[in-house]
């Protein structure tokens, strides 16, 4: 998968490629899709959400330029697969999911995959998670009309935010880099993601804004 669908398409960061080879993607997909886990396409995971195609996960991780000592925020946990890849690259990852059942299942999958530096949070991801900010990198796995100002406020000096921006018909993957009080925007190409939605959808015993399981010591291209 990595040779054919990721490295051959331009992802070059050796740490990202190693993470993509190491993280067991089949752990993060519903059982009925295990045979398709390594296909380069998104797969449904319930609640109208998908696990992004492997190439997109790798592309966003590379664009975020995650370093071993970085603190990373992911908005939109989904299956937990993207958080597992980021956890392989960073010191700590906070990942926020608005759907309670998905937050709970992602936590279980992350534990099964042996991730010990991920904090899974059931909350409104459009607000980020200011309690643990600032972050060296922020990765948003759903598309908004614009980058939320509250997320930019949680980005450390020198930090990178990667997010799809646009409507359901046309989206571009943006990288925003903070240089003191200045923000630099870079267009990384066309993508297609589910929409970024506010508020929290309940459905588990976890309260909105709670940390699901505590600190475990832890879409497709157009």
Image: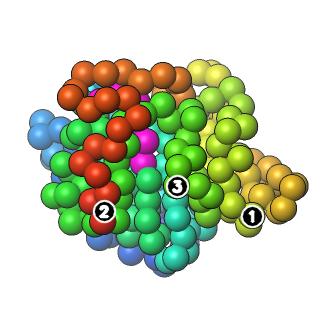
Question: Considering only vertical position in the picture, is 143 above or below 184?
Answer: above
Helix, strand or loop for disc 2? loop
In primary-sequence order, the first of circles 3 and 1 is: 3
Left or right placement of residue 194 versus residue 3 in this view? right
Helix, strand or loop for disc 3? helix
Left or right placement of residue 106 versus residue 221 in this view? left
Check disc 3: other Cα within 10 Å, few if <14, some if 14-19, many if 20+.
few
Question: Considering only vertical position in the picture, is 105 above or below 159?
Answer: above
Q: What stretch is highlighted in magenta?
A: 95-100
The residue closer to the viewer here, 183 or 14, is 183
In primary-sequence order, the first of circles 1 and 2 is: 1
The quadrant of the image that shows the N terminus is: bottom left
Q: Is residue 182 visible?
A: yes
The quadrant of the image that shows the C terminus is: top right
Residue depicted at 62% across the width and 39% down the height: 164
Q: Residue furthest right?
A: 182
Of tags 3 and 1, the one toward the viewer is 3
Residue of label 2:
218
């Amino acid at each position: 998968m990595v040779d054919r669908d990721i490295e051959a398409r331009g992802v070059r960061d050796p740490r990202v490629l190693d993470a993509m080879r190491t993280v067991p993607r089949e752990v993060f997909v519903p059982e009925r899709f295990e045979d398709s886990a390594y296909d380069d396409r998104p797969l449904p995971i319930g609640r109208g959400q998908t696990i992004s195609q492997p190439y997109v996960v790798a592309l966003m991780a590379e664009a975020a330029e995650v370093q071993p000592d970085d603190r990373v925020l992911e908005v939109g946990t989904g299956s937990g697969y993207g958080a597992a890849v980021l956890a392989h690259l960073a010191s700590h990852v906070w990942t926020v999911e608005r759907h309670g059942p998905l937050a709970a299942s992602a936590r279980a999958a992350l534990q099964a995959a042996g991730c010990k530096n991920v904090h899974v949070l059931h909350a409104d991801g459009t607000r980020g998670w200011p309690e643990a900010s600032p972050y060296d990198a922020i990765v948003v796995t759903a598309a908004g009309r614009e980058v939320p100002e509250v997320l930019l406020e949680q980005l450390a000096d020198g930090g990178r935010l990667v997010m799809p921006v646009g409507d359901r018909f046309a989206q571009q993957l943006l990288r925003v880099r903070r240089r003191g009080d200045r923000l630099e925007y870079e267009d990384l190409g066309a993508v297609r993601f589910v929409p970024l939605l506010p508020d929290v959808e309940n459905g588990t015993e976890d309260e909105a804004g709670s940390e699901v399981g505590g600190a475990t010591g832890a879409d497709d291209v157009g």
